[in-house]
Amino acid sequence: MPTLTIKNIPDDLYHELKYIAKQHHRSINSEVIVSLKRILLPKKTFSEDTLSSIQSLRSQITSNAITADDIDQAINEGRP
């Protein structure tokens, strides 16, 4: 695997990286790799998968939960 050397890292950035690495129980090197992957290789979602997820969530919502009239009534409650 290739090796990368980063020079002149600002102290505040280094300390934040070190803190986050400790929180995730990782080395600083591993935390840098994870951070770079998260930024440079974001998880790609396909519109069909997203639509399927939305439809699945919508099917779980009960139709009588809150109506537009309920919202209007809540907004207007207590108004003179």
Image (cartoon, grey):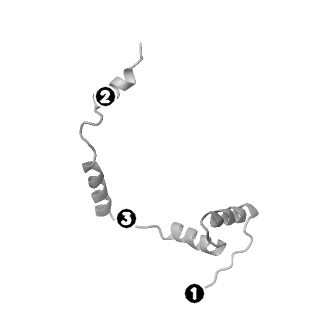
Q: Residues within 10 Å of mark 1 (few under 14, many from 20)?
A: few
Q: Mark 3 or mark 2, which is nearer to you?
A: 2
The amino acid beneath tag 1 is Met
Mark 3 vs mark 2: which is more N-terminal? Answer: 3
Q: Which residue is drawn at the image coordinates 30% and 54% (left, top)?
A: 54
Residue 1 circle label: 1
Vertical order, 64 against 24 (above or below): above
Q: Which residue is drawn at the image coordinates 57% and 87% (left, top)?
A: 1
Q: Which residue is drawn at the image coordinates 37% and 65% (left, top)?
A: 45
Element on which disc 1 rests: loop
Q: Which residue is mark 2?
A: 70
Q: Is residue 76 left or right of residue 69?
A: right
- Label 2 to label 1: alpha-carbon separation: 60 Å
The amino acid beneath tag 2 is Asp
Vertical order, 61 against 52 (above or below): above
Looking at the image, which is closer to me, 18 or 41? 18
Q: Which residue is drawn at the image coordinates 68% and 66% (left, top)?
A: 18
Q: Is residue 56 left or right of residue 34?
A: left
Residue 40 in percent (x, y) is at 52, 70
Element on which disc 3 rests: loop
The amino acid beneath tag 3 is Thr
Looking at the image, which is closer to me, 13 or 23? 23
Residue 53 in percent (x, y) is at 31, 57
Q: Which residue is mark 3?
A: 45
Disc count in the image? Answer: 3
- Label 3 to label 1: alpha-carbon separation: 28 Å
Element on which disc 2 rests: helix
Q: Is residue 16 left or right of residue 67?
A: right
- Label 3 to label 2: alpha-carbon separation: 36 Å
Mark 3 vs mark 1: which is more N-terminal? Answer: 1
